Amino acid sequence: MRPTCPAFSCQQGRAALAVLLGSTTGLSTARLRGAPAAIPRFQRIFLSDPLPGGSNGKYQVLGNMMVDAARLRCPDRRPAQRQPPTLGIFTGSRDYMVKHMLPFFTMVAGHVSATRPEVRWLLGKADYVTLEMLTASAADPAGRLIEGENARWEPAPPYGRLISDRGVVIEVLPPGEVMARADLILTIPGTNTAELTALGIPMIVLVPTYYAEVHPMPGVLGHVGRLPILGRYVKRACALAYHRHVRYHAHPNRKRRAEVVPEISGRITSRQVADRVCAMLVHPLEPMEAELASIMGPPGATGRLVDEVLSWMRERITQ
């Protein structure tokens, strides 16, 4: 009996494997991509971005499944610009990010609260970050590479809260709850900027370049960085060269090829970030919300993909 389920390829490096699987098993081959490209030997290519001229026999525009995933995580997003304003913090999902960025964000919160004491602060705890790591990063200054402010831990549901040296209270919550409640989120680049875009949440994206060699890098460069004496400097130079080559790091800016949300990069300071936050809070955030939501499109891409696959399988069964 001939197989009816297609072989899918979602990542750039897996296309050849999907084609090989299809040719050896008789499976149909399909590809999920953001934009059209010349890819031979795929019967269908499903796109997340609109196709000029509409769909055709090979390309099918489904929409972006990130919108569905984001709404699963945050199904009840509230309107922005409530009073008092609520700001969220996303430090990243890796321990080294939390170690350096949590104290930095705490210092930013202190600067902002000195001018806007009514602001509420929320910290999204990534699933891979333990509470032990969070509390240690907040309280222990040893090994920090950039400026930061200490904070002590206090128990409070659901996770707890941090109290900075200047008395700023930062409530620790699941990321989905922070997305639901925050008017503006401070974050670093990553998948979370796509989720925030899908939900229409205004953000400021920080790209600090201090000690660029501490960032993990794939392939050969990751191993070069471990070489004695010169390895760290080679890795730093390559990381900084990549940073100069990439114009935008936030997902919405890369999609639009323009600065939709602010990016602050380089050897940034907490005061610099705080000044930008205060400037944004003066103006309505609804226009940015609307533009962000339009970038990713409407929900429902997952259901459309399922319908297409089931329809494809029925066609093969009847052949």
Image (cartoon, rainbow, N blue to C red):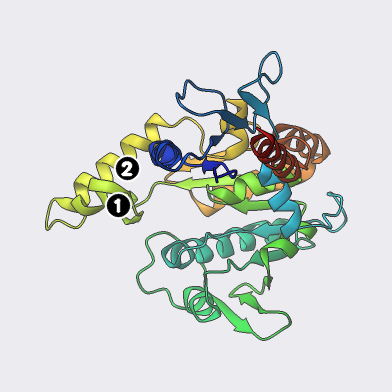
Q: Please give the name of the residue rendered at 45% of the width and 39% of the height, measured from the top-left corner.
A: 22
Q: Position of residue 295 (x, y in %)?
A: 70, 32
Mark 1 — residue? 213
* Quarter placement of the C terminus: top right
Looking at the image, the residue that sits furthest to the front is 1
Q: Position of residue 297 (x, y in %)?
A: 75, 34
Classify residue 46 as left or right of residue 224: right
Local crowd size for mark 1, using a 10 Å CA cut-off: few (<14), some (14–19), many (≥20): many
Looking at the image, the residue that sits furthest to the bottom is 155
Q: Is residue 104 above or below residue 67?
A: below
Q: Is residue 181 above or below residue 171?
A: above
Q: Secondary structure at mark 2?
A: helix
Label placed on residue 239: 2
Q: Nearer the viewer, residue 304 or 21?
A: 21
Whole-angstrom CA distance, mark 2 to mark 1, is 7 Å
Q: Nearer the viewer, residue 61 or 169?
A: 61
Q: Give the mark nearer the N terminus: 2 vs 1.
A: 1
Label placed on residue 79: none
Amino acid type at mark 1:
Glu
Classify residue 132 as left or right of residue 69: left
Local crowd size for mark 2, using a 10 Å CA cut-off: few (<14), some (14–19), many (≥20): many
Q: Position of residue 184 (x, y in %)?
A: 72, 50
Amino acid type at mark 2:
Ala
Looking at the image, the residue that sits furthest to the top is 53
Mark 2 touching mark 1, by CB under 8 A? Answer: yes
